[in-house]
Amino acid sequence: MRHIISPLDLSVDELNDVLDLAGRIYRDPKRYSKVCDGMKLATLFYEPSTRTRLSFETAMMNLGGNVLGFSSASCSSASKGESVADTIRIVSNYADICAMRHYKEGAPLVAAKYSGIPVINAGDGGHNHPTQTLTDLLTMKELKGSLEGLTIGLCGDLKFGRTVHSLINAMVRYPGTKFVLIAPDELKIPTYLKTETLDVYHVPYKETGNLEEVLPELDVLYMTRVQQERFFNEEDYIRLKDSFILDRAKLNLAKEDMLVLHPLPRINEIATDVDDDPRAVYFKQAKYGVYARMALIMTLLEIPEPQ
């Protein structure tokens, strides 16, 4: 039985296998529409979510399975003090696989230790978000043709952004990756990500506070919102929330084939006048997320390709 708590839980070969399967599902979804017939996915979301939760539910239903679960901690026995360990023990009796989002870092890992079914981390605090990373990788692979040799700009909240942390962990393993880290001083990536990941893999990177200056060199620009829920006081959030805003004028500085990604939800960090530019692929990215999660569910449940 496998769990996916971090993108590093999959080797590069396994990651590529999941992405290849997701690509096949994307091109022929009807072929996979009954492979999970009679199976159930439990979605245990202790923290609010729209895209991730609905994407998981859509993925399982597209595979012919069913869904049960809760959409906030207040709707579960956590409001009565039940532990994550006890909850997953119970849910293991009802479902075949579980997707868990939690506001505490490490909660899905705790769940995995006590679970009788595969656990997928659907986001834990500011730590990891491996299925968003699968979504990001699938988007880049399908639209760029390869995950090798890309210069990726990560912009916005790089300190608390779990999508950014997960993407760095995944992409350092692909040859030729370069990162441009665009953030105000208060929201730079944590030092441990530099010393334990970027430096260990000898991945070139530079840090800057100037988005316009580096736009021309990027193959991918990954925008993120400044997350109000991660701040301890509102003053800091208000001061930093408009640090970087991508608009049409700035986008004109970029390559004609640069991709603009965003894990969503967007607040105001991407102006709406960017939406109709062919380089803006964040809504298409959300669609790819369904196929990425379908492929991961099939992989963890060890479901063979339909004949």
Image (spheres, rainbow, N blue to C red):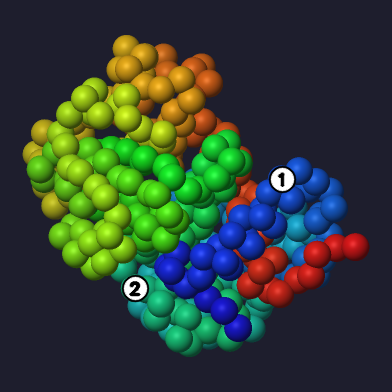
Q: Nearer the viewer, residue 188 or 44?
A: 188
Q: Residue at x 54, y 37 (%)?
A: 144
Viewer-nearest of labels 1 and 2? 1
- Would you place residue 105 above or below residue 168 in this image? below
Kindly identify which residue carries mark 1: 26
Q: Nearer the viewer, residue 193 or 203?
A: 203
CB within 8 Å, label 1 to label 2? no
Name which of mark 1 and mark 2 comes first in the sequence: 1
Task: Name the residue furthest right.
Answer: 307
Q: Amino acid at mark 2?
A: Gly
User: What's the mark number on residue 106?
Assistant: 2
Q: Position of residue 72 (x, y in %)?
A: 44, 59
Q: Amino acid at mark 1?
A: Tyr
- Would you place residue 184 above or below residue 84 in this image? above
Q: Position of residue 78 (x, y in %)?
A: 40, 72
Asked whether, in this view, residue 71 is left or right of residue 14, the answer is left
Where, by quadrant of the figure, is residue 123 drawn? bottom left
- Quick one: label 2, few (<14), some, or many (20+) residues within 10 Å? some
Count of residue discs = 2
Helix, strand or loop under label 1? helix
Q: Residue at x 79, y 70 (%)?
A: 304
Asked whether, in this view, residue 144 is left or right of residue 78, the answer is right
User: What's the mark number on residue 88?
Assistant: none
Helix, strand or loop under label 2? loop
Q: Nearer the viewer, residue 207 or 271?
A: 207
Q: Residue at x 63, y 72 (%)?
A: 300
Is residue 69 visible in the rendered image? The answer is no
Is residue 219 visible in the rendered image? The answer is yes
Q: Position of residue 6 (x, y in %)?
A: 42, 68
Question: How far apart are labels 1 and 2 at the CA level?
Answer: 32 Å
- Quick one: label 1, few (<14), some, or many (20+) residues within 10 Å? some
